[in-house]
Amino acid sequence: MNQYESAIWAVGSVIEQYDSDKKFPVIGFGAITPDKQKTWEVSHCINLGEASGIAGILETYRNIFLQGFKLYGPTLFHHFLDQFITKVEAKGPCSEYQVILILTDGMIHDLEETKHQLVWASFLPISVIIIGIGNSEELDNMRILDADKEPFKDKNGRFAGRDIV
């Protein structure tokens, strides 16, 4: 089991207990898909389907490499965060609480856009778990998103409504 799989298992096995049907949408980001390998176009929001439980998520993760996916940067969060937030918003004010788990190995290259998305999400029934895997120096700017000590604001000066990361 590699470091990504270990992180998926460790965190996933805890949060899985709070989901009644144990069905999880899996979204990939920062990869060159098999159909884009000639152009080296990086995809930042790849719908990988729905997985049953943590074992299903791990199986999906392993299968993407067998299918020819290649992990590649830059690390951009705002594409899939926008899609996730839009789906939660569409369910209305009584939407079920949602948690998104993000595993990443690199610096966030769209930090301002990500902060904007997270400020928006902070007013919805959403929490975000980000696990940085790899060199800690490349992960330093993610600490800004942890608003335990100090709330963060987006480029428009809007503060997050609550700490969701």
Image: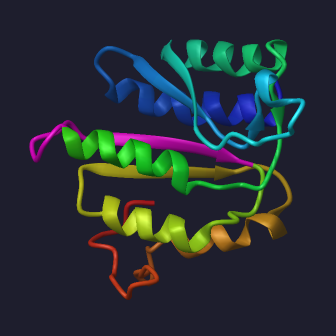
| Apparent side of residue 160 relative to residue 4 in the rendered image (left or right) | left
| Apparent side of residue 71 relative to residue 15 in the rendered image (left or right) | right
**Which quarter of the figure has residue 124?**
bottom left
Identify the image quadrant of the C terminus. Answer: bottom left
Colouring used for the render: rainbow
Q: Residue at x 75, y 17 (%)?
A: 62
Reply yes or no: does residue 31 show up in magenta.
no
Q: Residue at x 55, y 74 (%)?
A: 112
| Apparent side of residue 108 relative to residue 27 in the rendered image (left or right) | right
Please, is residue 11 above or below residue 56 in the view?
below
Please, is residue 69 above or below residue 71 in the view?
above
Please, is residue 71 above or below residue 18 in the view?
below
Identify the image quadrant of the N terminus. Answer: top right
Give percent across and percent down for residue 61.
Answer: 70, 22
Please, is residue 68 above or below residue 112 in the view?
above
Given residues 84 and 150, the one toward you in this image is 84
Given residues 144 and 29, the one toward you in this image is 29
| Apparent side of residue 21 relative to residue 5 in the rendered image (left or right) | left
Per the rendered image, the range of residues in magenta is: 91-104
